Amino acid sequence: MTVGAFPKFRSRLFVFLGGVSLVAGIYSGLARIGWYVPLRSELMETVHGPLMLSGFLGTVISLERAVALRHVTAFLIPAMSGTGAFLLLFEPLYSVGQLLLLGASLGLVVLFLYLVRSHGGFHVGVMAVGAVLWLVGNYLWREGNLLYQCVPWWAGFLLLTIAGERLELSRLLSLPPTTRKVFLGSVLLFLAGLASSRFFFAEGLRASGAAMLLVAFWLLRHDMARLNLRQQGLPRFMGRTLMGGYAWLAVSGVLWLFFAARFDTGPFYDAMIHTFFLGFVFSMIFAHAPIILPPVLGFRMAFAPSFYVHVGLLHASLLLRSGGVLLASQEAQQWGALFNAFSILVFVLVSVRAVSSATPR
Ligand code: HEM
């Protein structure tokens, strides 16, 4: 059955489920960084990472794939990840939630195996490896590994998913074969770092950090975003936001390279994680939202200069948060984190406004 027979409201339901993870994830993140929130519990604080990663990002990424594939069974993947993440919030159902998330990542791997066979292409292969990394991260987590040991695999899932998508667009630029080889070499270095982190954790992460830096330079140099900078309106907004995200990826790579030994807890861990997840990944979300949300949700979105507000807020608050680490200021880190959350809220509000001011489909 194709998605034509699959009403748009179900896509909206999955976005809603992903949104629940996002809100719960931000709430638990704020509790974890020391802000007072009601109903605080140990469980709520430990599920922050899985809610953000598998619950929110896993759901929206697999939903986007399902919509592109236009096949009803593919929608089981976001259904599983959205529901699984929701169940994590209830202690007796925690392990059912973990199982559903593991199932969702396995489903995404199967979906990509199908895409590799039916469509082929280097970029599809890169994204397929990304899905495998999500599966490995979820497996390690389900097996009882500590969260910080799973985080690099989850980060790999996002890095390869995003890089694969950008690579697909860069095909239009007909890049020389050596450029592709440099990209492939960086991805292989990242994977080698991840694999060796199972035995030599810090050394492995350093290699992956170096690879992140290489991927960031590659994207800054070869991505289509550079061409968009010369245009106006939405393309220029996207170009600038993507470039900002690549810069954060480079910062994150440098932090992993130099502070990998502290990748377990504390302020440096916070900076290493959030320069990547907020600086890089959320910049990608902010940049792509105006073109990805309309086909997924069936709404139009009108570009407005106010799109720059949440992007500016994200960069400024992340500078404050990571700067707080370097200056050993817990206060700066906490306020930065609060404004990180605020930037996501502003993004939602600006997007809703952009939908309501656009002409209906
Ligand atoms: C928006 C506001 C956010 C706040 C206030 C926040 C807060 C925190 C805090 C305090 C930690 C623990 C750091 C430590 O151990 O010292 C943490 C860990 C983590 N965060 Fe966030 N975060 C936010 C956004 C995000 C986003 C958007 C993502 C992913 C997309 C994310 C993913 C993670 C992950 C994976 C961990 C590591 C999990 C763990 O070790 O428990 N966070 N966050």
Image (cartoon, rainbow, N blue to C red):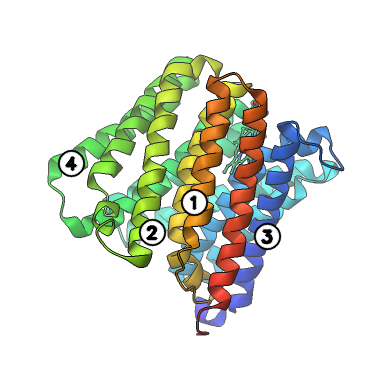
Q: Are marks 3 and 2 in contact (CB under 8 Å)?
A: no
**Res 182 label:** none
- Residue denoted by label 1: 311
* Quadrant hosting residue 203: top left
- Residue denoted by label 2: 237
Q: Amino acid at mark 1?
A: Val
- Residue denoted by label 3: 17
Which is more foreground, mark 4 or mark 2?
2
Q: Amino acid at mark 2?
A: Phe
The residue depicted at 48 percent of the width and 18 percent of the height is 259
Which is more foreground, mark 3 or mark 2?
2
Q: Are marks 1 and 2 in contact (CB under 8 Å)?
A: yes
Sequence-wise, which precedes: disc 1 or disc 2? 2
Secondary structure beneath label 1: helix
Q: Residues within 10 Å of mark 2 (few under 14, many from 20)?
A: many
In the image, is residue 220 above or below residue 207?
below
Sequence-wise, which precedes: disc 3 or disc 2? 3
Secondary structure beneath label 3: helix
Residue 153: % across, % down: 50, 34
- Residue denoted by label 4: 179
As rendered, which of 298 and 271 lies closer to the eye?
A: 271
Q: Amino acid at mark 4?
A: Thr
Which is more foreground, mark 1 or mark 4?
1
The residue depicted at 53 percent of the width and 71 percent of the height is 354
Q: Residues within 10 Å of mark 1 (few under 14, many from 20)?
A: many
Q: Is residue 124 left or right of residue 35?
A: left
Can you tell me which quadrant of the image ligand 1 is in? Answer: top right
